[in-house]
Amino acid sequence: MKHLLSCLLLVLACAFLHAEPETAPLLTRETNAWPGLPSPRAGFAAGLADGHLLVLGGQGHEAEVLALNLRSWLDAASAPETGWKSSQGAARPSFSGVAQHETGLVCVGGLDAQGASRRVTLVGWSEGRLRETELPSLPLPLAGCGAAIVKDQLYVLGGISGTGAGKAESALLRLSLKAPGQGWTTLEPFPGNPKVLPLVFAQYDVVHVIGGREAVSGPGGATLWKASNETWVYRPVPLDGTTQRGWIRRNPLPVAMAAGGGSGLGQAHCIIACGDTTAESPLPLAINTASTARMSYLYHTLTDAWVETGVPLQGTGTVGIKHPSPTRRELLLVGGLGTDGLSQLKAKRTVRNLMWQDYLVMGGYFVVLAGIGFFASRRQSTSSDYSLGNRSTQWWAAGISMFATGASAISFMAIPALAFSTNLFQLFPTCMLILGFFVQAYLVFPLLRKLEITSTYEYLERRFDRSLCLIASAQSILFQTFGRAAVVLALPSIAI
């Protein structure tokens, strides 16, 4: 029973634990260390290749290629040592869809002098020169589309087939970058209103589609392009324990925007910033040049919740580039109209401090626990009686004690969080384990009690030999110390 009371007291203590209110911004912004672009621009492509930041084209700069050495940022989070290297090349389409690949950036479609383009290229950087590899052309011309890469699969969505198009395209296209010769595959069409200039990026095998512009009827039957706050995700593979895949609608962005910059950060966060919040535009690819600061937002993929970061940012049509290291929650915002600077955003790791009320509750828990042990020990004459409950504990009480002994942060934090982020299937093993405790207490414990042994390790010694008892005991100690205990202690430390 002491284990049951201990468990109840621990749950009560956790209910009273609380953290100091979080009032500081959720992001920090650094701009001083980064050399800005030669001039503001929109419709450009940007990404990382061989330790360099590449900025390709853009309206009014179609033939310009810019490269900035970012090895110091990628390796040591310090400022780059050199400035931009500029060169002129062949004109390339503006408003291409861009996806970051481990070898460079993939540019999809865009708008050139002939109209919307079908061109798809993998752009890399080697020995101070731009390297381009042509990939299979799109099935249809697209400009203002979005692109993302999931496990070497390139996904392309949205965009318009020409400047005179009356609506955006809803087709979802896929190309294997490992076997590009197989060509493009058409997947489930976008179920929402087709978008141009949506923010599309990949995070943990999921394609996020946020905002964009959709065609609506204006005065006199003219087509207007309305900013959207719709948020969708596309799952190429089912979620763990389910068969759910394909398109899933999520909570909308707090503000309607198009041509936003952003990406995923860490395991479950996304940052969205610097979009064009113009309500309606007569042109699908027009970007507002106003330099008004706009709020940035964080999105939590598990709770499907949006929150303002408290950090307003300048510019529209900005490209967001995530740091490739999974341990660095940093985003580099590149250029755009209204600004020519580079902003380095870092997601803050929130540290919550315990207050005196928290320490009082925890101290009271240990005092009560010690009191239970003290008063219970006065009713037993030997340590064996105290440890084994005089071998007279009822089976149901023994089952509750087993659950209380085995319960930990995994039971109260990890498994519920996993069930919340996936589905209730994750709770099934735990429910069966609780049932198993009572079955074991009812059937097995009476047999062990007749043997008058202290532990199952003593049974192994009686049944076999002492060496097997020591081996089993050592395995249990190692597992509890370096396996289970590490996780059990780490989970509460993350929470508080």
Image (cartoon, helix red, strand yellow):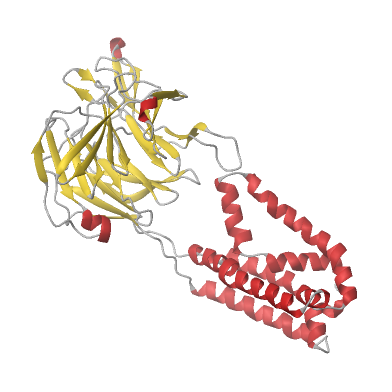
Dividing the picture into quarters, in which one does residue 60 lie?
A: top left
In the depicted structure, whether residue 400 falls above or below residue 26:
below
Which residue is at the far bottom? Answer: 381
Q: Name the spot of residue 68 as percent of width and height, x first.
A: 16, 48
Dividing the picture into quarters, in which one does residue 223 lie?
A: top left
Q: Name the spot of residue 107 as percent of width and height, x first.
A: 27, 32
Q: Is residue 361 left or right of residue 67?
A: right
Which residue is at the far top? Answer: 220
Q: Is residue 29 left or right of residue 353?
A: left
Q: How many marks?
A: 0
Task: Please report the residue visible at 22 percent of the width from the left and 26 percent of the height from the top.
Answer: 286
Task: Please report the residue visible at 60 percent of the width from the left and 53 percent of the height from the top.
Answer: 416
Q: Name the spot of residue 111 as percent of width and height, x first.
A: 22, 24
> Where is the N terminus found, in terms of image quarters?
bottom right
Residue 255 shows in the view: no
Which of the pair 200/195 is nearer the observer? 200
Q: Is residue 95 left or right of residue 148?
A: left
Task: Please report the residue visible at 86 percent of the width from the left and 77 percent of the height from the top.
Answer: 391
Q: Is residue 356 left or right of residue 397?
A: left
In the depicted structure, whether residue 299 falls above or below residue 22:
above
